[in-house]
Amino acid sequence: MAEQANAFKNEAFAADIQAEIELLQWCDALILQFPIWWFGMPAILKGYMDRVFVPGVTYGRGKWYEIGPMAGKRALVSCTADCGPVGYSPRGRYGELGILLWPVHTSLRFIGFDVLEPVYTGLVSAGDEERKAGLAAYAARLKGFETDQPMPFHTEDDYADTYTLKPGIKGKTIAQWGE
């Protein structure tokens, strides 16, 4: 983080990182498309976020979550795997998809994005019919991209100074349901 802050202060990001930061700032919407890899995002995507979601640019100085630099922009996670959707359900072998994607969704929200419910396409190696059905479902989902309600996240007002929900505030997110 110190090196990123120094690069921000001195306008010294590597050219490829600067270009990605500018694209992120320019975009109205972001779709992250990736295969579920070891129950999460691939390392290359994590590396992208580590390098491009930088302090002073995408968060910090009192700007995060609902007042972050990406506020008013939408983000969608679209992921694939080779199992049916029930495998990533609460009783599925691989666990609830929302829990697996929590780090990605929270990172997007942290920098201000309104995060939409994810798109999951499974059985990717099952054959042409399944792929066509998956693509059709994805196309249908994208039609609501501008109008679908974002996922619920708490606002700053819901938290006490201890970074915990204030008394009487019920958890809204998948990571807080068991509280």
Image (cartoon, rainbow, N blue to C red):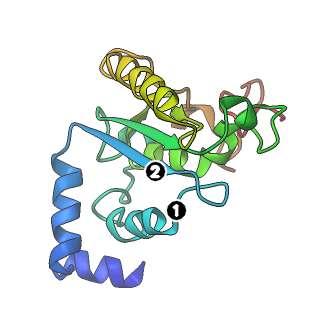
Whether label 2 touches label 1, CB < 8 Å? yes
Q: Residues within 10 Å of mark 1 (few under 14, many from 20)?
A: few
Q: Quadrant of residue 52?
A: bottom left
Quarter of the image for residue 4 reads bottom left
Specify the label residue 59 is tagged with.
Answer: none
| Callout 2 secondary element | strand
Quarter of the rendering occupied by the C terminus: top right
Numbered badge on residue 42: 1
Q: Label 2 amino acid?
A: Phe
What amino acid is found at the position of numbered circle 1 in the picture? Pro
Front one among 25 and 11: 25
**Residue 53 image offset from top left, x and y in percent:** 36, 62
Q: Residue at horizontal 67%, vertical 54%?
A: 39
| Residue closer to the observer: 84 or 61 | 84
Q: Position of residue 150 (x, y in %)?
A: 46, 24
Query: Which numbered tag is attached to residue 34?
Result: 2
